[in-house]
Amino acid sequence: MVMITDLPIDQEKKILARVPKESRPQWQTTCKRWYAVRQDLLSKKHLARTGREFILLLNTNVFSTTINLQGVHNNVDPVMEFGGKLGSLQDSNDLQIHDIFYCKGLVLCTMVGKQMLVVCNPSNRETRYVEPRTRHGCFEYALGYKGSKSSCVNSYKILRYCRYFDKQLMRTVSEFELYDFMSDSWRVLDVDEHDWEISARGVSVKGNTYWVAKKKDDQFILSFDFTRERFGLLPLPYESVGTEDSINYKYDDTAVLSVVRDEQLSVLHQYLHVYSSEMKIWFRG
């Protein structure tokens, strides 16, 4: 005789999915494992119906949006709904947002025509203003956190990458600065000499940031570990086309990073030729 506890977890899920919702409150006291499995099934079902939430920058304003892809395999058009401006920025009508960077519940905003940074938490409407240490015009920002979990706001850090022409040295130089939320201060990072350049905006995955970068004709993924405060290089899942080949043979080689599923890094690669076009997506396991 097979006991109910000997059933495979997949079989248990099929059985529990058929139990009426009126019986659900009794599970919390009679069988906590069944209750947890049922709650997980309901959460996944709810997410599938409601769609995924995104943050959208539109005309210098930041909005929360929901995209529902249910039915796309049955020739049903996806539905996009606007949820309004982010709550933490609703009272800041004079702020014109230039760019945004999202990391695990926090949104880093750069301003149009201003050096000031704004970090907001849409869930509790908290906002923090951060003054940059220097005022160089060409820069790139990233938001991340130290450790494996974003336990509190004090675990977050802001990376600032400045690239400008030094008139005294008569050459382009790069500077890296790090803002620590706990100490409320900036400090300069000591980064070894490098000759790479960030060529596409970054994304945050489990507290660290990833960009598409290039070194001469070679493209790769550049990462920054906010715990160790170090850069790292990862190969792209395809062979990139050099600048000279792109011009001579009319190629267009473009890569964009994104985050899917449970914070999984993905690469969207678009390879265009005068006679054909190709687009591929890779996921990092």
Image (cartoon, rainbow, N blue to C red):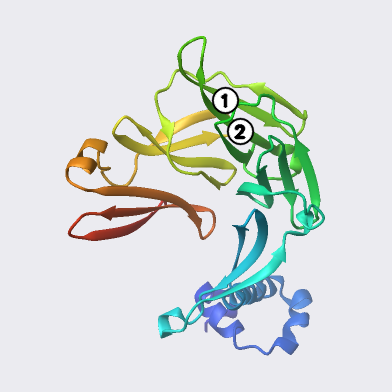
**Horizontal and vertical percent position of residue 201:** 49, 44
Viewer-proximal residue, 177 or 93?
Answer: 93
| 95 to 90, vertically: above or below | above
**Horizontal and vertical percent position of residue 161:** 55, 30
Q: Which residue is mark 1?
A: 176
At mark 1, the secondary structure is strand
| 211 to 56, vertically: above or below | above
Three-letter amino acid code of the residue under disc 1: Phe
At mark 2, the secondary structure is strand
**Horizontal and vertical percent position of residue 28:** 76, 75
Disc 1/disc 2 C-alpha distance (Å)? 7 Å
The structure residue drawn at horizontal position 56% and vertical position 46%, both measured from the top left corner, is 204
Viewer-proximal residue, 168 or 268?
Answer: 168
| 278 to 220, vertically: above or below | below
Which disc, if any, is residue 1? none
| Residue 268 figure quarter | bottom left
The structure residue drawn at horizontal position 71% and vertical position 66%, both measured from the top left corner, is 84
